[in-house]
Image (spheres, coloured by chain):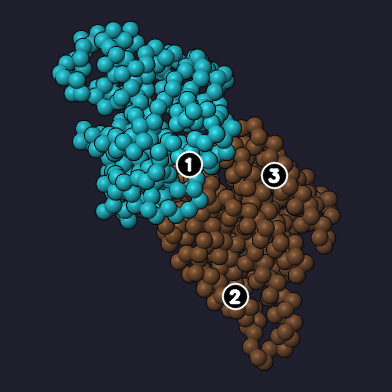
Chain colours: A cyan, B brown
Amino acid sequence: MITGGTPERSCKGRSLGQAGLLLAQDLTIGNRLRNVSADLVPGKISAICGPNGAGKSTLLSALAGLREPDHGKVLIDGMPLAGIASNERARRIGYLPQTGEVAWNLSVRHLVALGRLPHGDAGENAVSAALEATHLTEMAERPVSTLSGGERARALLARVFATDPQWLLADEPLAALDFYHQHEVLAALRAAAGLGRGVVLVLHDLALAMNHADRVLVLDRGRLVADGPPEEALSAGTILQVWRMPARWMGDEGRRALSVG
Amino acid sequence: MMNRATTLFGVLLLLAMPLSLLAGRVWIDAATPNATLILMDLRLPRAMLAVTIGAGLGAAGAAMQGYLRNPLADPGLFGIAPGAALGAVVSLHLGLASGLLLPAFALIGAGGAMALLALIAGRSAGIALFTLAGMMIASLAGALTSLTISLAPNAFAMSEIVTWLMGALTDRSWADVQIALPPTLAGIVVLLFAGKGLDALTLGEVAARSLGMQPMRLRWLLIVGTGLTVGSGVAVAGIIGFVGLIVPHLVRPLTDGRPSQLLLPSALAGAVLILVADMACRILPLVTELRLGIALSLIGAPFFLWLLLGMRKEMA
């Protein structure tokens, strides 16, 4: 569906150990984020979880280079993100904010094509591939105002796909979606990770994180309190400590459900 | 940049131009005495001015609506037009309005508003705060204009100021064209450079930045672009309202909706609208010629109401 995007293609001349990585080093932003460090690897889905106000969105936007940290830095392929020109950064990191704003009533195709702005080309192949990956090809000419909530969320995700970025950062991309569309979008994200892209998601739904992420970062009041495979990072102990809710996981690995109380 | 709407309004402009040269109190035909004189010294500069000002207002309106992501935005919001009006009113008040002095004062007023905006631009983070600051400049300039009017030495001076504010293209010459045309053209080019950034803003400020839009660069393009177009327009024709609001609306449904695609056709449509409205002002059999600014507001206000009612229906 989407071509290119392998991390190896653009890592000449940088320290080998950091090639392809998105590194947060000791990030501090006001009271929202305190001394958070993480090394995100491409080809995987990483989920950022935590209660409201834990700093999830702040961390994601800092990783996207949209928020200047008070302290610490973000590195991509070993280079400080802050030193990369905005268009170049935009070509490497696609970012999907939580607000699904679309100010004007564009067609789905034109909306998705906005993802080509950092490249300054029409990128028709990339746009078609992004429409295909999100199952929107048939409604490409429809105005955005006629879409359902789920279709709209997929169109906005397709916009990020169209950029053909190395990294795909999305803030609550599943929040407005029903059960069926959540899994459809997750499948598209998994396919993107399969092509070597790094996928980083802010997720509220712990069961989705548990079953679909390769790695989970748990934030609590601005601090990183757990980081690892979902079975470890989202243990009942962590959930009790961070969310203050007694809970236990039911079912088999990969199909867990959270039972609260 | 070329699209269906650009072609349509380009053709309309080519049709309206010769008509506006021939129409007026005196209809020009082959037998009209002094036909060349009327055409070259009266009608042509006036038509050129109508096209210039309309194009500037149309493009500035389209850019402002794109920047604020709001179809109700108007180029007057940043306070540049009120700043230029204040400059002009001060020159009239001081009796320094002869020849090129009035436009010069107006340009200084517009420049002052732009300088204030630039000062604010570096300090306020989001678009909403920046726009509010621009509206405060507009409201300050409006208050100072009213103050100047209230301090007018006599009734005649006051009426002169008020009449000027109404906006008109009566008795304009090539000198006025020379004042307005170059800055307006430059301003439209500057606004065209903002197109990509405005497209990105369709997705909101944060998503736009993630697409590489540079907020400060875009803000500067907007300040300079609207300053040049609107400021020079007010300097030669006074306040002409509603064009910057209506024109992008009329044009938007004919485009694919992207703000960048709206700029050029809005410039052309604005030119057509003012050209035709000014022609109508000349032809209408009234005791005195209808002021262009009044005529456009007479069309504009009901249109605005209709728009609001339509939006209410959409929300319901």
Q: Is residue B302 visible?
A: no
Q: Position of residue B272 (x, y in %)?
A: 56, 68
Distance in Å between CA atoms under marks 2 and 3:
33 Å
- Above or below, comparing residue B141 to residue A72 in the picture: below
Give whichever of B107, A20 is nearer the camera.
Answer: A20
Residue A5, disc = none
Crowding near the residue tagged with mark 1, few <14, some 14–19, many ≥20 C-alpha atoms within 10 Å: many
Q: Residue at x 45, y 48 (%)?
A: A116
Residue under label 2: B17
Chain ID at mark 3: B
Q: Residue furthest bottom?
A: B31
Amino acid type at image mark 1: Arg
Query: Residue at coordinates 25% horizontally, 34% vertically from top-left?
Result: A182
Q: What numbered label is drawn on residue A91?
A: 1
Q: Secondary structure at mark 3?
A: helix
Q: Amino acid at mark 3?
A: Met
Q: Which residue is mark 3?
A: B114
Check the residue under mark 1 and report the chain it is in. A
Sequence order check, earlier mark of 2 and 3 = 2
